[in-house]
Amino acid sequence: MRKLKVAIVGATGAVGQEFLRVLEEREFPCATLSLFASARSEGKTMRFRGESLPVRALSEARLAGHDLAFFSAGASVSREYAPPAARAGVLVIDNSSAFRMDPEVPLVVPEVNPGDIAKHSGIIANPNCSTIIMVVVLKPIHDAATVKRVVVSTYQAVSGAGARAMSALFEETQAYLAGGTVTPGALPFASAPKHYQIAFNLIPQIDVFQDMGYTKEEWKMVRETEKIMGPGIAVTATTVRVPVERCHSESLNIETQRKLSQEEAREILARAPGVSVVDDPENMLYPMPLFAAGRDEVQVGRIREDNSIERGLNLWVVGDQLRKGAALNAVEIAEEALRQGLI
């Protein structure tokens, strides 16, 4: 496998730091690794494979000459810098929402639609974290029994809202326990006209409200699932922010065309790539964010038949939002592109 000149755009953010860990752990073939962030981060250093690498301000000229660039600096940065990088011959794997629904840009989860990687014209989009975690589990069920409809409720960690929200969880919890004044300032999202406390609370809003009273995050799960898995699967979503540092959890209610028993569903999922079955109710074993953090696999448990319909399943799914929901999925896209000879 040839070695690549690799760049990370947004290296100092939570996902950027996770990129460094994932690339090192998986021994990704980097000939060089360049780290980019905003101008205020220039001069910082970050550790990779025992070395201190400088962080530089992003520019088109500095990106040119790389083979591969992982973008995780927000949609506006991606829209400005990804197209010229792609024109310069850099394969961009973008973790923002900028290109996910662009019909010319493949939206990829390697366990689900690796063939779409070959359709790229320089940019490949990484799906939304909650979508990735869901479709990794849906795909083997769909292949076996054809999924008709999914009702998903998410319980999303503050890590999905970035470093500011992660700090808010700890600071608000400390203030609350000390009997002090809690001053929220990060959620439901940083630019919201008002903010709510996340410590000891749930917030049933992730991103702005859009059509039919659904949030942008909820519509992402609907539309991205269709783009990744194809038409014919009806999805409705409710997304909730919870006071958990890391890992998103999802309750999936799935209706299939062919009936699957609890035992058959468990066997299918146990064989599925990227999935780990943690399902032993008698011994109180089931997926939880506390134990899924730092894990590559999406964990699934509480597997049971839906008592209210003939061909239904209930699943409880947990995945690390910063790993499989972001950095790991992007690196796996790059690995698959290398295997396909597309880089």
Image (cartoon, rainbow, N blue to C red):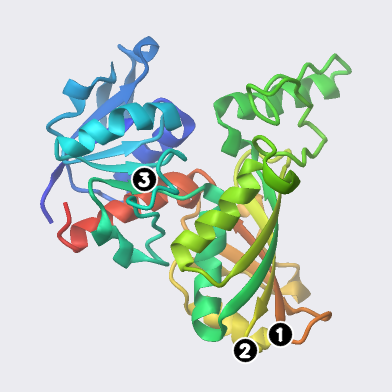
CA separation, marks 3 and 1?
39 Å
The answer to which image quadrant residue 113 occupies is: bottom left
Which amino acid lies under the numbered mark 3 shown in the image of this protein?
A: Val
Q: Name the residue under label 1.
A: 311
Name the amino acid type tagged 2. Arg
Tell me the CA gap for discs 2 and 3.
38 Å
Vertical position of residue 229 compared to residue 95: above or below: below
Residue 262 seen: yes
Q: Which mark is residue 22?
A: 3
In the rendered image, the residue lying farthest to the right is 179
Q: Residue 73 falls in which quadrant of the image? A: top left
Residue 258's disc number = 2
**Residue 110 image offset from top left, x and y in percent:** 37, 62
SS type, badge 1: loop
Q: What element carries label 2?
A: loop
Nearer the N terminus, badge 2 or badge 1?
2
- The amino acid type found where label 1 is placed reads Arg
Cα–Cα gap, marks 2 and 1: 7 Å
Is 333 on the left or on the right of 149, as rendered?
left
Residue 213: percent from the left, percent from the top?
75, 44
Question: Which element type, helix, strand or loop, lies under badge 3?
Answer: helix
Camera-side residue of 63 and 327:
63
* Residue 6 visible here: no
Residue sitting nearer the eye, 22 or 67 = 67
In percent of the image, x 24 and y 20: which residue is there? 59
Q: Is residue 227 left or right of residue 55?
A: right
- Of circles 3 and 1, the one toward us is 1
- Determine whether, in the image, residue 267 is placed left or right of residue 44: right
The residue positioned 63% from the left and 28% from the top of the image is 165
Query: Residue 47: x percent and y percent?
Result: 32, 28
Q: From what the image shows, is residue 83 above or below residue 143? A: above
Which residue corresponds to the image point at 40% horizontal and 52% vertical from the top-left? 329
